[in-house]
Image: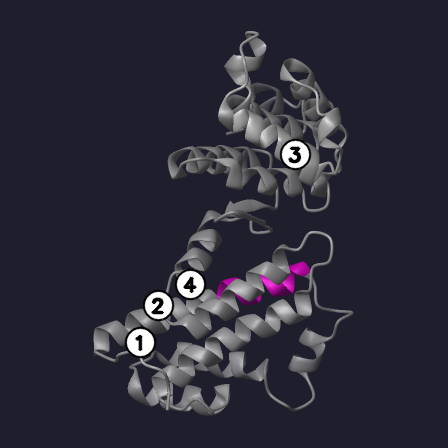
């Protein structure tokens, strides 16, 4: 909900999603998530470092900042060094930092608390990124996140791995590969359709025809399936335009990852209702 200042025009409502930038409000919110779970009471009250804090501090010093361990300060001095470094980080370096600290959590409850806290800040400040699992990924809508996570949880390894690779390529903040992310998303659909068609060598177009025969599908969805096949056809046209390295963008790759995940989730659900087993490999 807009604040008092935003409602009355004293502060503009932020309507641009932060994709390749990070304002101070977002950076401060993410720092506070880190601070509350790692450094809050012991350091500020003058107490000694906990085992978790010591492990994190030395890991950051040696493996993240790439500094000599014998120069690592103790207690509050270490806290101040980390805070000052964080304040100077570029937007992508902040996300590198957050991903780096995840493995230090000693239990899943603390890890989930940290991730959920960060996601609340990311959503509040209109960031284009969210934690999905232990990775920060450029997906900004909760429904899209749920769709992708459902796709990543299916039991069919081939399709699941393709979706995971698509997400990885999309999530690379320094060298994102949108073209190959799109290809991996489509390959995930092809993989699940090959299982339904029981033909490991079937192209997506051929497998889709078998899918339509085995699963009752609404006419509009059949049309959508045909259009999806258009993205992978060998003919000139939409495939070459979409997969051209110079034209493939974040929005294209995000759309295909979400759409293909939703498509796969739909097929898995329809197969479950019609009694089609998907756990076996296609012949």
x and y percentages locating residue 125 in the rendered image: 60, 34
> Which residue is rendered at x = 78% and y = 69% of the image?
246
Residue identified by numbered label 1: 279
Q: Nearer the viewer, mark 1 or mark 4?
A: 1
Residue depicted at 52% across the width and 36% down the height: 104
Label 2 SS? loop
Label 4's element? Answer: helix
Mark 2 closeness class: few <14, some 14–19, many ≥20 residues within 10 Å: few
Distance between the alpha carbons at the discs numbered 3 and 1: 42 Å
Q: Is residue 37 visible?
A: no
Q: Looking at the image, is mark 3 or mark 4 earlier in the sequence?
A: 3
Q: Secondary structure at mark 3?
A: helix
Is residue 84 shown to the viewer in this render? yes
The range drawn in magenta is: 250-259
User: Closer to the observer: label 3 or label 1?
Assistant: 3
Q: Position of residue 99 (x, y in %)?
A: 59, 42
Q: Residues within 10 Å of mark 3 (few under 14, many from 20)?
A: some
* Circles 1 and 2 in contact, beta carbons < 8 Å: yes
**Along the horizontal axis of the image, is 89 left or right of 233?**
right
Assess whether mark 2 and mark 4 are in contact (beta carbons under 8 angstroms): no
**15 within the magenta span:** no
Q: Could you tell me how far apart the alpha carbons at marks 1 and 2 are, in whole angstroms?
A: 7 Å
Q: Is residue 255 magenta?
A: yes
- Is 56 placed left or right of 89 in the picture? left
Q: Which residue is mark 2?
A: 155
Where is mark 4, residue-wise? Answer: 151
Residue at image mark 3: 60
Q: Quadrant of residue 76?
A: top right
CB of mark 1 within 8 Å of CB of mark 4? no
Q: Earlier in the sequence, mark 3 or mark 1?
A: 3
């Amino acid at each position: 909900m807009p604040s008092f200042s935003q409602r009355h025009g004293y502060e503009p409502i932020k309507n641009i999603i932060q994709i390749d930038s990070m304002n101070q409000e977002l950076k401060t919110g993410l720092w506070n998530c880190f601070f509350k779970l790692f450094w809050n009471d012991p350091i500020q009250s003058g107490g000694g470092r906990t085992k978790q804090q010591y492990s994190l501090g030395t890991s950051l010093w040696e493996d993240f900042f790439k500094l000599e361990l014998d120069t690592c300060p103790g207690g509050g001095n270490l806290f101040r060094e980390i805070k000052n470094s964080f304040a100077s980080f570029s937007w992508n370096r902040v996300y590198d930092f957050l991903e780096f600290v995840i493995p230090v959590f000693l239990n899943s409850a603390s890890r989930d608390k940290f991730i959920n806290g960060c996601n609340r800040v990311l959503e509040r400040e209109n960031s284009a990124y969210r934690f999905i699992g232990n990775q920060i990924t450029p997906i900004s809508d909760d429904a899209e996140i749920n769709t992708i996570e459902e796709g990543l949880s299916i039991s069919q390894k081939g399709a699941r791995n393709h979706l995971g690779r698509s997400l990885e390529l999309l999530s690379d903040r320094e060298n994102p590969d949108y073209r190959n992310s799109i290809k991996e998303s489509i390959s995930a659909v092809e993989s699940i359709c090959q299982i339904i068609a029981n033909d490991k060598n079937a192209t997506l177009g051929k497998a889709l025809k078998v899918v339509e025969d085995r699963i009752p599908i609404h006419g509009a969805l059949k049309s959508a399936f045909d259009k999806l096949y258009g993205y992978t056809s060998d003919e000139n046209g939409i495939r070459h335009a979409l997969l051209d390295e110079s034209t493939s963008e974040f929005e294209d790759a995000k759309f295909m990852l979400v759409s293909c995940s939703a498509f796969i989730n739909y097929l898995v659900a329809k197969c479950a209702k019609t009694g089609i087993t998907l756990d076996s490999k296609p012949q």
